[in-house]
Amino acid sequence: MTDCIFCKIVAGGIPAKKAYEDEWVFAFHDIHPLRPTHVLVIPKKHIPSLAHVGPEDEPVLGRMLSVAQKLAAENGSGDGFRCIINTGRIGGQEVPHLHLHILGGPEPVGPMVTKLKENA
Ligand code: 5GP
Ligand code: ZN
């Protein structure tokens, strides 16, 4: 049995508020939402991060993006949203199973990232 929490969510071993599912991807609401809309889209296949994808993953990567706009619209972000894929230590990735954050709501999401002090 895998130790990956997102694989466990796909398998139903850990409860999550499901937003979408098809043969390739699974989507669910983030347990600690940062905006009124905060949905995670993941491949059903365990891929540790965006640094681990290959050409064979292009179909599932495309599916993740194509379902993002549908999920955003269905979850209160029809006027726009932001997609984020944190990758590795530098990217601030906490869960080592590739996931796309969809962030939105009625108000602008805000600055993309804060400036580094030396560049301010
Ligand atoms: P990361 O920092 O890796 O890009 O984002 C991981 C996200 O997964 C965080 O926003 C965190 O709140 C969310 N998360 C972690 N564990 C769980 C969980 O068990 N259930 C759900 N629904 N979200 C989770
Ligand atoms: Zn996994």
Image (cartoon, rainbow, N blue to C red):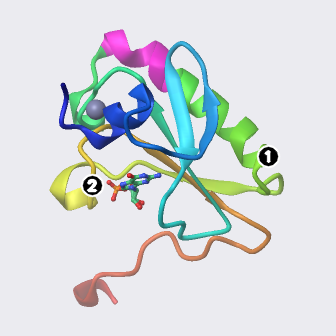
Q: Which residue is mark 1?
A: 73
Q: Is disc 1 placed on a helix, strand or loop?
A: helix
Q: Position of residue 65 (x, y in %)?
A: 58, 33
Within the displayed image, which quadrant is ligand 2 positioned in?
top left
Separation of marks 1 and 2 at Cα, in angstroms: 25 Å
Residue drawn at 70 percent across, 73 percent down: 108
> Does residue 33 belong to the magenta stretch?
no
Q: Position of residue 57 (x, y in %)?
A: 37, 16
Q: Position of residue 21 (x, y in %)?
A: 60, 25
Q: Image quadrant for the N terminus?
A: top left
Residue 9 falls in image quadrant: top left
Q: Which residue is mark 2?
A: 93
Residue 64 falls in image quadrant: top right
In this rendering, would 1 be left or right of 47?
Answer: left
Residue drawn at 35 percent across, 39 percent down: 6
Q: Is mark 2 within 8 Å of ligand 1?
A: yes
In this rendering, would 70 be left or right of 47?
Answer: right
Q: Main secondary structure of the magenta part?
A: helix
Residue 95 drawn above or below residue 34 = above
Question: Which of 51 and 13 lies nearest the eye of the viewer?
Answer: 13
* For the residues bearing labels 1 and 2, Cβ distance under 8 angstroms: no
Residue drawn at 53 percent across, 70 percent down: 34
Question: Which of 46 and 61 lies nearest the eye of the viewer?
Answer: 46
The three-letter amino acid code for the residue at tag 2 is: Gln
Question: What stretch of residues is rendered in magenta?
Answer: 55-61
Residue 83 drawn above or below residue 21 = below
